[in-house]
Amino acid sequence: MRVLLLGGTGEARRLAARLTADGVDVVSSLAGRVRTPRLPAGEVRIGGFGGAGGLAAWLAAERVDAVIDATHPFAATITRNAADAAAAVGVPFVVLRRPGWRPGPGDDWHWADTIAGAADALPHLGRRVFLTVGRADLAPFAPLGLWFLIRSVDPPAAPLPREHVVVLGRGPFQVSGELALLREHRIDVLVTKDSGGDATSAKLAAARALGIPVLLVRRPALPDVPVVATDDAAVRWLAATGSG
Ligand code: NAP
């Protein structure tokens, strides 16, 4: 059976490794945003499909039997396009989505519905910001008269805040390193998407340890499609589609 695995996440790489080891013909798809992506096992294609219509045509031409969307929780456009395309050509479709983060004792968490909403709320929470929302979502923060430590995988482009330092990095991160970063730059507020998962959660533990507030951006809503939360559940779903 041939499976399109929409990726760009750690769980997509894990699932690609598992399915290819099981003899499934997996094509992983990456958007091409990262200069040197970590490549999954099996066949890989890179770049957009040209919207839902382009993806539907691709699924038909490649004779794909099932689509698994293991993209980042904030990659809402590709998930909506994939749901539409799979429905249009009658290919089974599931989203593999890791759970969001949950606050624990000692956390001082604040929520925004959007990146723009986070930028609006930020001046009420601190002056020296650790901004970890990804380089594509920095523009709303550029006009704010705050100091920023910006972390991204590849160097960010303008518009950027007037006062900022960039640190390049790709998870997984450790709590000790995150604590050192927060202390070194005298950070008093952390901004993050509710990405979930272990690879980038150390910053939350570090903020808790230092009593620093965290401003989280809520996930965009998913379309009305089947959703699983683990590799195991995705493998079971694939088997249950009838040809896995
Ligand atoms: P997006 O806004 O949902 O998608 C924008 C466009 O990029 C899509 O319409 C599609 O172009 C193309 N695209 C996105 N993911 C693709 C994939 N896996 N394979 C082929 N084309 C893809 O997505 P995004 O937020 O730019 O994220 C792009 C990729 O980076 C995703 O694979 C995601 O898993 C990863 N990522 C995103 C974030 C984040 O915070 N958004 C964080 C970490 C990793 P066409 O319409 O031309 O098909």
Image (cartoon, grey):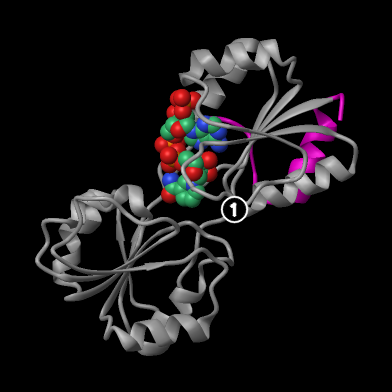
CB at mark 1 closer than 8 A to ligand 1? no
Q: Nearer the viewer, residue 190 or 232?
A: 190
Q: Nearer the viewer, residue 155 or 211?
A: 155
Q: Which residues are magenta?
A: 223-244
Disc 1 crowd rating (10 Å Cα; few below 14, some 14-19, many 20+) is some
Q: Is residue 91 visible?
A: yes
Asked which quadrant contains residue 182, the reply is bottom left
Give the residue pinned by disc 1: 98
Badge 1 amino acid: Arg
Asked which quadrant contains residue 20, the reply is top right
Is residue 226 on the magenta stretch?
yes
**Residue 173 vs residue 212: left or right?**
right
Asked which quadrant contains residue 243, the reply is top right
Q: Is residue 191 above or below residue 143?
A: below
Element at label 1 = loop
Q: Check the picture and name the quadrant holding the N terminus.
A: top right
Task: Report x, y in % for residue 69.
Answer: 61, 36
Residue at (74% x, 47% y) in the render: 15
Q: Check the picture and name the quadrant holding the C terminus.
A: top right
